Image (cartoon, rainbow, N blue to C red):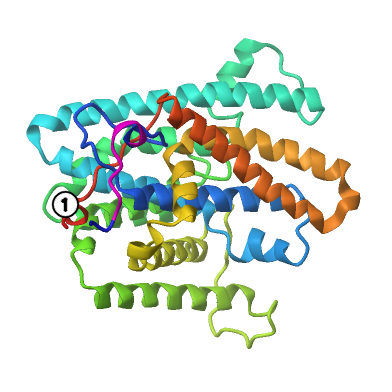
């Protein structure tokens, strides 16, 4: 049996942030569904924490110390581009169709952004937390210019739109070096010219570094699969040790540890180099760590639950936005129950899982969606 399960039929037609085409493989790598689902679960935890849902002593741990959702979500999206679309881009007969579908996908995500942003602004106006808009034309214009309605989907619109260019660079000799160097240069430029592109919690000039890091890792996923267990274990240990050092740098005073000699700045908004490294090391630690035990982990109910969320990442993300807002309102209304509000977590996750399950059970494919082909090494038995 291969390292990743290979469901077929209706189950192999799941949905996610990116859509594959009719020329895709019929199998899917459940690890990627699982990793993306982990990011969604952490996103729910973090956003409930930000909405002041009481979680007792676990609140700070779940909502701050172990958060990885934002960086992990963008990283795994880039990994998918490198693992799935780069092999197609290297085939002349599929290259044009692959790029065309990526651009079409970007437009579809933009369509989702229109729907979500319009509904979100209307909800905020109704709640009295947003200034009334002058008209639908003004609202649509603000959404198109990414001035309204959140910032994660607009980031995906831009990243998927430039994905063909990134693949063109990566498929060439030393393309990985040009891509890495160019991405770091853009990140440094973005640190000093952050308002060049649409602003928000996810400035594209900064967050492209997370996406391209994932793309580069995804482009060598086949080679990673072929490594020995000992090599993979060594890599995972290095990632977790690096994350531990960064954790020490950020939280030494909270836990009464001696001050670390270097004190970098950790900032998500705007994304700082240290915060990028924290996201990167923790995400790679989770990816390599879970892969090491996949032969046991892959058949568990936890993976089945999490991968179901990951296969429907886009509708789950959209639904979670409004579910979290409602949970925050409910937490304020039921403030007296205290730390029992942590029960909002399983309730939200089960509701999102039921949504994902219903969409997959009916075989519906709300754009954009994704079927994940297996890497050659993962298909080997």
The image quarter containing residue 258 is: bottom right
Q: In this view, does 358 lie above or below 345?
A: above
Task: Name the residue tied to disc 1.
Answer: 376
Q: Where is residue 142 in the image (x, y as percent from the top left)?
A: 59, 23
Q: In this view, does 365 lie above or below 33?
A: above
* Pick the front one: 203 or 366: 366
Report whether 295 appears left or right of 326. Answer: left
Membership of 9 in magenta stretch: yes
* Residue at disc 1, secondary structure: helix
* Pick the front one: 275 or 287: 287
Q: Where is residue 271 in the image (x, y as percent from the top left)?
A: 52, 55
Residue placed at 49% from the left, 42% from the top? 309
Locate the C terminus and report the quarter of the image it occupies: bottom left
Q: Position of residue 247 (x, y in %)?
A: 56, 73
Report whether 368 appears left or right of 375. Answer: right
Q: What stretch is highlighted in magenta?
A: 4-11
Membership of 217 in magenta stretch: no
The image quarter containing residue 165 is: top left
* Pick the front one: 233 or 3: 3
**Residue at the extreme left:** 92
Residue placed at 38% from the left, 57% from the top? 298
Locate the N terminus and report the quarter of the image it occupies: bottom left
* Pick the front one: 81 or 265: 81
Q: Position of residue 371 (x, y in %)?
A: 31, 36
The mark tally for this picture is 1
């Amino acid at each position: 049996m291969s390292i990743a399960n290979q469901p077929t039929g209706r189950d192999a037609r799941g949905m996610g942030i990116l859509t594959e085409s009719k020329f895709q493989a019929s199998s899917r790598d459940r690890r990627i569904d699982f990793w993306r689902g982990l990011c969604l679960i952490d996103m729910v935890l973090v956003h409930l924490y930000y909405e002041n849902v009481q979680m007792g002593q676990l609140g700070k741990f779940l909502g701050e110390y172990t958060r990885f959702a934002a960086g992990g979500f963008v990283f795994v999206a880039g990994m998918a581009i490198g693992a799935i679309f780069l092999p197609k881009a290297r085939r002349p007969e599929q290259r044009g169709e692959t790029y065309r579908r990526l651009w079409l996908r970007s437009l579809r995500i933009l369509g989702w952004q229109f729907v979500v942003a319009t509904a979100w602004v209307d909800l905020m106006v109704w709640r009295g937390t947003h200034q009334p808009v002058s008209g639908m034309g003004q609202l649509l214009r603000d959404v198109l210019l990414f001035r309204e309605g959140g910032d994660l989907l607009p980031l995906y619109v831009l990243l998927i739109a430039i994905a063909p260019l990134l693949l063109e660079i990566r498929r060439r000799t030393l393309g990985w070096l040009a891509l890495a160097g160019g991405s770091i240069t853009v990140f440094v430029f973005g640190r000093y010219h952050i308002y060049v592109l649409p602003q928000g919690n996810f400035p594209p000039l900064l967050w492209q570094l997370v996406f391209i890091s994932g793309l580069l890792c995804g482009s060598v996923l086949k080679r990673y699969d072929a490594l020995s267990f000992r090599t993979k274990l060594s890599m995972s240990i290095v990632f977790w040790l690096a994350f531990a050092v960064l954790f020490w740098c950020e939280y030494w005073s909270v836990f009464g540890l001696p001050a670390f000699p270097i004190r970098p700045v950790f900032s998500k908004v705007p994304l700082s180099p240290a915060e990028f490294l924290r996201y990167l090391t923790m995400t790679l630690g989770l990816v390599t760590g879970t892969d090491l035990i996949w032969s046991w982990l892959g058949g568990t109910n936890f993976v089945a639950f999490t991968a179901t969320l990951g296969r429907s990442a886009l509708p789950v993300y959209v639904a979670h936005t409004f579910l979290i807002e409602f949970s925050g309102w409910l937490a304020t209304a039921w403030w007296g129950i205290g730390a029992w509000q942590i029960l909002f977590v399983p309730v939200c996750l089960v509701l999102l899982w039921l949504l994902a399950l219903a969409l997959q059970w009916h075989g519906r494919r709300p754009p954009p969606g994704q079927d994940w082909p297996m890497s050659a090494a993962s298909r080997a038995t």
